[in-house]
Image (tube, coloured by chain):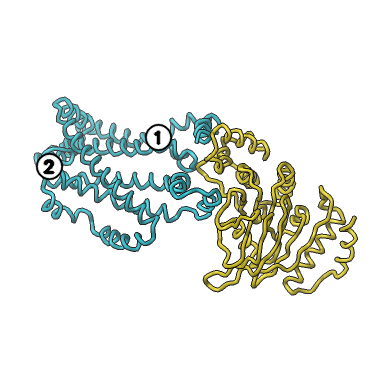
Chain colours: A yellow, B cyan
Amino acid sequence: MLLLDRVSKTYPNGVRALERFSAEIRIGEIVAIIGGSGCGKSTLLRAIAGLERATSGNVTLDGTAILAPHAKIGLIFQEPRLLPWLTVAGNIGFGLSDHPSAVRREAVARGLSRVGLADKANAWPRELSGGQAQRVAIARALAPQPEVLLLDEPFSALDAFTRRDLQDHLLDLWADTRPTLVLVTHDVDEAVVLADRIFVMRPRPGRLFAELDVNLARPRDRNSPLVENFKRLVLTALDRSLDRNVPDPEARSTVGDAMWW
Amino acid sequence: MTVELSALEQTDALSPRAPGRLSRLARPALGLLLPVALAIGWELAVRLGLSNGRLVPPPSKIFATIVELAESGELVRHVAATLGRVFAGFGLGVLAGTLLGAVSGYWSLARRLLDPTVQALRAIPSIAWVPLFILWLGIFETSKVALIAVGVFFPVYLGVMGAILTVDRKIVEVGRIFRLSGPVMIGRILLPAVLPAYVVALRVGLGLGWMFVVAAEFMGASEGLGYLLIDGQQLGKPAQIVAAIVIFAILGKATDWLIEIIFAPLLRWQDAFSRQGGIA
């Protein structure tokens, strides 16, 4: 279990990026964190990744405190961040350097076929499209078989088609080994389609505003009324988090039925 | 590593450059057109008596001078002397520039301590050191090598430091996520990231090395291509001067090309490099 206990982060310039964020994230769960800009969602993710130390509070994975990057926690960034001097295969195997080469080769081959890029093994990153590059990044993060995979707006730089494609792809990959996924996004559609649970955050200081259980059967059809209703519910929560007028006060009751469907 | 290496070796077959074979040969040939035409034109002008070719000797005379120098064994002696000086100075300059540049780039305290001094020294025209070097190190080889090393040092130092400072923090973060230790981070992230700029710095440094070897050999040498230049001037042998210049050009280009081909396999990932890599 990934346990976040009153995680707070104040930057040296006094900005309170994150304040007392607590949550329990179960193994194999998909959690989406959504919120307006400056709500601390990326800070939270970086704290879970061990890239930034929380000012106070704890992040623990199965009882171990996370103070630095951890072998069981992978991270996918908004940009692919591939190493341009390694081929696609080299990039996928990058996190496996301490494995014997036979094991690594096999893991790389498996990763390549899992993301559908077996024919690109020897291509350079500059030869890939944005979607392909991000798939390589996903394969690279999954190669060491992390128990927790963190995703920081991973598809936001892609066009709508590619984004949907990769969202579905991510779910397929997740179904194989069922790692815990923590996904930061600003895309309501993405959160509802992917997540078991959605944390809505509010800005200044960044804190948890609402927590929504997405009790919709998988696979989810993006165009079904149930998904549409749930999106409206999330949007309502987001608007409330920003103290805006709520456009559709009925949303909660309709979705309330759907949840038990 | 094996995965990455085998992947490196296989890319050639896949690269879409094969159709450009012909143009790859044709392009350097195009570059030769102008100098060859000029040379033939001048040769004809002298042969037809349009010019006596005394101060500007025709190509045949220059070639004859080179052959003459080569046959007497003089050429090998002078070339060896000059090459030895350039290599020694280049080696020392690269070593010092790389070490200090790496320290300054990697460690900000060292940069604050070192960089202002180095930058101030850089502002001094390197030739200005000549009298001091002669006083300190004598008129013979040491002062010459020192001057060349000083010339090579600055571009290498600046190149290495600049390259380390501009390594993409986002890519370093990838290394952190995969928990690379300090030395591994240097080997797998920093060095490959710095390499392209380093090669450029080496090539600029080598160019300056060739420049300064001439200056060094002007200040009293008994052998070397620079000596041939001075000797040709004092004895009124323009063919010898041009011959030395031609040999300088050939050696300069050849050594630059050497750096290029040594590092080419490591830089194949770079778009620009492979495109301009039509080695002439």
Q: Which residue is mark 2?
A: B221
Residue A124 image label = none
Q: Is residue B53 visible?
A: no
A9 or B198, nearer to the observer: A9
Could you tell me how far apart the alpha carbons at marks 1 and 2 are, in whole angstroms? 34 Å
Neighbour class for label 2 at 10 Å: few (<14), some, many (≥20)?
some
The C terminus of chain A, quarter of image: bottom right
As drawn, the residue found furthest toward the left would be: B235
Neighbour class for label 1 at 10 Å: few (<14), some, many (≥20)?
few
Chain containing the residue with disc 1: B
x%, y% of residue A246? 81, 72
Mark 1 residue element? loop
The answer to whether residue B39 is left or right of residue A212 is: left
x%, y% of residue A135? 65, 44
Tag 1 near tag 2, CB within 8 Å? no
A188 or A145, nearer to the observer: A145
- Residue located at (52% from left, 36% from top): B4
- Residue located at (38% from left, 34% from top): B280
Q: Which residue is mark 1?
A: B279
Which residue type does callout 2 highlight? Ala
Q: Reading the chain from its start, which is encountered first: label 1 or label 2? A: 2
Which residue type does callout 1 highlight? Ile
As drawn, the residue found furthest toward the front would be: A63
